[in-house]
Image (cartoon, helix red, strand yellow):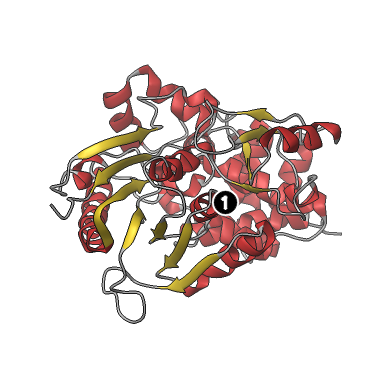
Amino acid sequence: MQNAVNLGRKAAAEALIAAETGAHVEDALAQLAPHEPGDRALAWNLALGVLRRRDALDASIVAGAKRSLRTIDPAVRVILRCALYELAFTRTPPHAAVDQAVALTRRLNVGHAAPFVNAVLRNAPPANPDMPGFPDVLVARWRARWGAGADAWMAACNQPAPLFLVPKEDEAGLCRSLQHAGIVATPVGEPGVGPRALSVPPGPVTGFPGFAEGRFWVMDPAALEVADLLAAALPAGATVLDACAAPGGKSLRLASLGYRVTATDSSVDRLPRLYENAQRVGVSLDVSVMDWTAPTGPGAERLYDGVLVDAPCSGLGTVRRHPDIRWRKSTPALLAGHLKTLATRQAALLHQLKRRVKPGGVLVYAVCSPEPEEGEAVARTLSWAIEARVDSTPGAVDPSLGSDAHVAFRFRAPGLG
């Protein structure tokens, strides 16, 4: 009798296979992970864990197989990575990890490789937990820029991402409600223009006190700081354009502070979550689809007191939350070309949207990336003076704080005089 494959393991492997062909692993997991809570958690933890430790897992595969990774079927590679991750980084009994991997070959239609998988897993050395967890191109780039800070950043990114909540209004009251339910909530950072983010233990936020009542939303402190960079320079009741708004955390922050927010995104598929969060939190947003690289239709010529350009970027500042990003451009040539293409698009978007700022108004340009080609270099293409900035990259903050790496620059538009 063949061993039954755990559905969480099967979903993790299928999501990782999809990621190898360009899909986002989280999108794949959202569709594939089973509904049973334990199996669903296993699927997410296993898939994300494999991506965080892929370099060490691949080194073990090569040592155990005594052949190049390129000669191994992609599905078989994924099965081996999953099993080796369980062997090195979880409490799964070794015999269970091996038996499940062999059974998984049959479920993924590579049953011919079952003897090979069994042999590799029994011969491979344990995955080395001290390896960086990133492709060589990023390791070299970051160590050259940040020194020992790069290793601290990469080590932090190989741990599960922390959870942060942003209160809509009452920071102290939400803290009390959470702590009354046994959820320790710790404010992050110094008081600013609104309630601070709260660090809380990972858990199902839909069951947290205050979720259904719209008392908070999930948002990284670095992203919150970007929204506050704009808010700090605006008068009460000002009009704001969040030009690349989805999934909407910055729009929620600005609206909760009393600004009149127009939230746009170029993809209609990205807007439902923004609608849902705005409705739950109870803030008013003017939401529409708009591609600001070629704007047309209602609102394309409107001017605003403040404009936020949170530009599409490599996302390399969010690799702790989205570990598949680190492997997408894993050679120097691919990474350099990718950053150059993104910077060209970002500069075009920035120069298009500066036209939507009222005279004397405020423009913020931001990316969730620590790469200077997408941040500083693009910001410097604008002739307006930079009056303030935020920087949560590893060179500026302690990576152990757990926030993503963002950079943002605030400009003041020339006045009428």
Q: Quadrant of residue 317?
A: top left
Dot 1: what SS? helix
Image spot of residue 268 (x, y percent):
48, 74
Q: Residue at x 73, y 42 (%)?
A: 97
- Badge 1 amino acid: Ser
Seen from the viewer's position, the closer of residues 236 and 100 is 236
- Looking at this rendering, what residue extends furthest in the front direction? 417
Which quarter of the image is occupied by the N terminus? bottom right
Say above or below: 117 vs 163. below
Q: Is residue 111 left or right of residue 298?
A: right
Q: Position of residue 208 (x, y in %)?
A: 78, 45
Whether residue 212 is visible here, answered yes or no, is yes
Give x and y (percent) for residue 149.
Answer: 39, 21
The residue at which mark 1 appears reads as: 256
Q: 198 or 127: nearer the eye?
A: 198
Q: Quadrant of residue 92?
A: top right
Residue 160 locus on image (x, y percent) = 61, 36
Residue at the location (47% across, 43% down)?
223
Q: Nearer the viewer, residue 355 or 374?
A: 355
Residue at screen point 49% across, 62% down = 23
Vertically, is 188 above or below 101?
Answer: above
Q: Where 298 falls versus 339 (above or below)? A: below
Classed neighbour count for the residue bearing mark 1: other residues with Cα under 10 Å, few (<14), some (14–19), many (≥20) = many
